Amino acid sequence: MSVNLSKGQQISLTKSGGGSLANVRMGLGWQAAPRKGFLAKLTGAREIDLDASAVLFAAGEPVDVVFFQHLVSDDGSVRHSGDNLVGGTGVGDDESIGVALERVPSRVDQIIFTVNSFTGQTFEEVQNAYCRLIDEDSGQELARYTLTGGGPHTAQIMAKVHRSGEGWQMAAIGEPAQGRTFQDLLPAIARHL
């Protein structure tokens, strides 16, 4: 059963029958908002290039990143599905990042998931954007965070997966930010570590 998260809400990443999840995937989906007016009929649908990134932190410092130009973390525990340059049809995830939780180095205590508009379009031009966490082994959706409303921002700090005791937890962040790349977002990310 999936949980619809609201900003700031957390869930534990333990199996309902006990034990920790081994492999999770953060899926991202979006669509371009329809254009309005006479020119919209002439120009048709626009393409929106959003990019999903996962920044791995150890004691508050970034130690690795997975994004469209670095698809696999240095240790191999985090993998990006590849870059989607145009946005989705509303069916399935447009980009995803898989995390083998048991393989994440012990020094990594947080993984922050972000999405940014590489081409600089704002979220006013995006609709139906979401991130969701899936148990890779069962295919079950565990949690979903839906972006509500647009806005003049070009990025979102979506969620984080962080160590909690012996296991992991996911927290929905949903903070608008400005930036075309994950590097641009690092100051805003720091507030959530």
Image: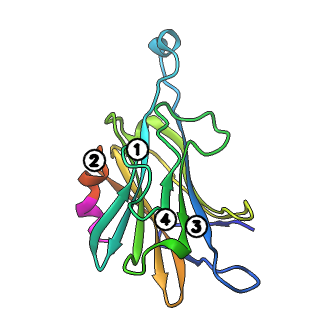
Task: Give the label on residue 5, or none.
Answer: 3
| Mark 2 surroundings within 10 Å by alpha-carbon count, few (fewer than 14), some (14 through 19), many (20 or more) | many
Q: Amino acid at mark 3?
A: Leu
Q: Tell me which residue sits at (42%, 75%) in the image.
A: 105
Q: In what element is the residue under mark 4?
A: loop
Q: CA distance from mark 3 to mark 4?
A: 25 Å
Residue 192: x and y in percent read 34, 72
Residue bearing the label numbered 1: 68
Q: Please name whichever residue, 91 or 177, is drawn nearer the observer in this view of the structure.
A: 91
Residue bearing the label numbered 2: 179
Q: Magenta stretch? A: 186-193
Query: Which of disc 4 and disc 2 is earlier in sequence?
Result: 4
Coloring applied to the structure: rainbow
Q: Is residue 9 visible?
A: no
Q: In what element is the residue under mark 2?
A: loop
In this view, the residue farthest toward the top is 42
| Mark 3 surroundings within 10 Å by alpha-carbon count, few (fewer than 14), some (14 through 19), many (20 or more) | some
Q: Tell me which residue sits at (75%, 68%) in the image.
A: 1
Q: CA distance from mark 2 to mark 3?
A: 24 Å
Q: CA distance from mark 1 to mark 2?
A: 15 Å
Q: In what element is the residue under mark 1?
A: loop
Between circles 1 and 3, the one closer to the viewer is: 1
In this view, the residue farthest toward the bottom is 165
